Image (cartoon, helix red, strand yellow):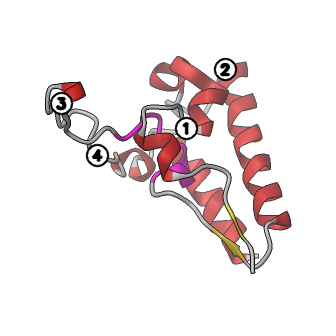
Amino acid sequence: KTIAYAECHDQSIVGDKTIAFWLMDAEMYTGMGDDGTSGTVVIERGMSLHKVIRAITMGLGGEGYLNFMGNEFGHPEWVDFPREGNDWSYQHCRRRFDLADSGLLRYRCLLKWDVALHAL
């Protein structure tokens, strides 16, 4: 049996970038607004590649597809649990699920696509 995944929790927990952040980088903080117009080239390309990577992973992966929470909608930040190295900060010890719920942000489009992919 094989379980496939495009990114794992270790990638996000140890401070590495998520796939979405590798593809769109800091523009995710300013370019994910959805006012009905096309996004920037970086955001449009990044979202498209994000979808393709997940489709290939799911299609070729075998019997199962694993997704670390938040990455299905392109969560922009890593998870950093309180520890001595970050002065016991809780600042990045969360997932912002509200990003995908907002009708004003493009994160919802990635989540809708992921849901549709699972329905195939």
In which quarter of the view is residue 18 placed? top right
Residue located 46% across and 52% down the image: 70
Check disc 2 and give the amino acid type: Thr
Front position among marks 2 and 3: 3
Q: Which residue is mark 4?
A: 94
Q: Are marks 1 and 4 in contact (CB under 8 Å)?
A: no
Question: Which region is colored magenta?
Answer: 70-79
Q: Is residue 81 left or right of residue 66?
A: left
Q: Which residue is mark 3?
A: 84
Going from N to C along the chain, the mark reached first, 1 or 4, is 1
Q: Which residue is mark 1?
A: 18
Going from N to C along the chain, the mark reached first, 3 or 4, is 3
Task: Give the class, few, some or many, for how many residues have Cα within 10 Å of label 1's Cα (few <14, many ≥20).
Answer: many
Going from N to C along the chain, the mark reached first, 2 or 3, is 2
In which quarter of the view is residue 14 placed? top left
Check disc 3 and give the amino acid type: Glu
Check disc 1 and give the amino acid type: Thr
Going from N to C along the chain, the mark reached first, 2 or 1, is 1
Secondary structure under tag 3 reads helix
Going from N to C along the chain, the mark reached first, 3 or 1, is 1
Whole-number angstrom distance, CA of label 4 to CA of label 2 = 27 Å
Disc ID at residue 40? 2
Front position among marks 4 and 2: 4
Secondary structure under tag 2 reads loop
94 or 7: which is nearer to us? 7
